[in-house]
Image (cartoon, rainbow, N blue to C red):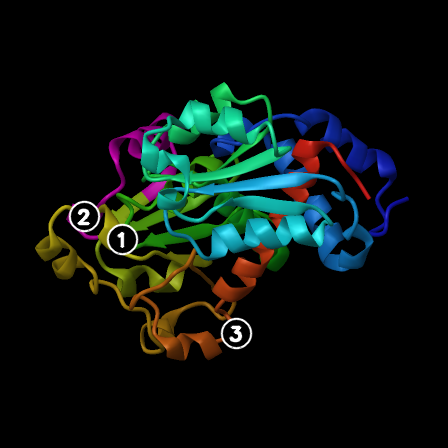
Amino acid sequence: MVGDGRPSWAIRRIELSLKGKSLIEPLNFTVAEMDELFQVAEGIIAAPREYIEVCKGYLLATLFYEPSTRTRFSFEAAMLRLGGQVIGFSEPGSSSVSKGESIADTIRTIECYADIAAMRHPKEGAVTVAANSASIPVINAGDGGHHHPTQTLTDLLTIKLKKGSINNITIGLCGDLKFGRTVHSLITALLRYQGIRFVLISPEELRLPGFVREELKSKAADSIETQNLTEVMPNLDILYMTRVQKERFFNEEDYVKLKDRYILDGAKLATAKPDLMIMHPLPRDNEISVEVDRDPRAMYFPQAKNGMYIRMALIMALLGVSK
């Protein structure tokens, strides 16, 4: 038996199913595989010191072509807490990319040194190119406005820990739904669960992009669109706030017009359910008032910590190691 009471074959099963794979988008893993990852993460949360040497001798490369705090640090902390080591860069100017090196050449060089890689890139599809060129597992740490699957694993784990189940929830997604890759990935993943109702809250200019709207339509998802957060607040089990992303705008004037459209504060929460979960992938700008941090329903900092635990489970699974 393992430390959290599960038989050792439960961990071995996920090692065998995911070992050597890459993670580019949420649908790369089945619901069963994700559930097994959550079980491993819960085991780590329960007994973290039992995992401090499982990746000893392994090396993670973090290739971040875009700024990041939580995602990069949580990947690095995850590998270090598993006993492994980390190499990489936090901005492309410090790599041979500044000399014109291609993504394919970069990853083929990195795999000479590292056992697994996590990559963030501003261009959609760049991580797919890397994964297709690599012989080591490559994890998408965010590619432009496309997907952010490890944030999705973080979000789903947080919901499961707090609600006990990912099924039968009404989730409000608020803010920048057009460029928010965390929203795109989360919707894609939630479409595979039962009884999910989506409430899409955004200005007209920041509505969901066409490829996500088509996913909702093809699955006949229960969803509504609105621009009024206050009106739908009483119905929500989860409120997932997002930042209006300045870096995705070509026009400063358009960004300024939209950036403070939704600001969550105590007054807006007056009609919310007592067990509402307030989530945010972070960083935040002005869309959640600091007064909300004291509200026990605020889950965004525990959510960030869960990101480290699920990435620990993911690294273990892709490398095929166990405690």
For the residue pair 72 and 95, the one nearer the viewer reads as 95
Residue 296 tag number: 3
Q: Residue at x 65, y 48 (%)?
A: 79
Position in image of residue 197 (x %, y %) = 42, 45
Residue 81: tell me if it is visible: yes
Q: Do the residues labelled 2 and 3 touch (CB within 8 Å)?
A: no
Crowding near the residue tagged with mark 1, few <14, some 14–19, many ≥20 C-alpha atoms within 10 Å: some
C-alpha span from label 1 to label 3: 27 Å
Image quarter of residue 305: bottom right
C-alpha span from label 2 to label 1: 7 Å
C-alpha span from label 2 to label 3: 34 Å
> Does residue 17 sit above or below 177 in this rendering?
above
Q: Earlier in the sequence, mark 1 or mark 3?
A: 1
Residue identified by numbered label 2 = 249
Element carrying mark 2: loop
Q: Which amino acid does label 2 sit on?
A: Phe
Residue identified by numbered label 1 = 245
The image quadrant where one finds the N terminus is top right
Left or right: 250, with 187 as reference point: left
Q: Is residue 259 magenta?
A: no
Q: Residue furthest right?
A: 1
Position in image of residue 161 (x %, y %) = 63, 56
Left or right: 22, with 45 as reference point: left
The image quadrant where one finds the C terminus is top right
Q: Which amino acid does label 1 sit on?
A: Gln
Q: Do the residues labelled 2 and 1 touch (CB within 8 Å)?
A: yes
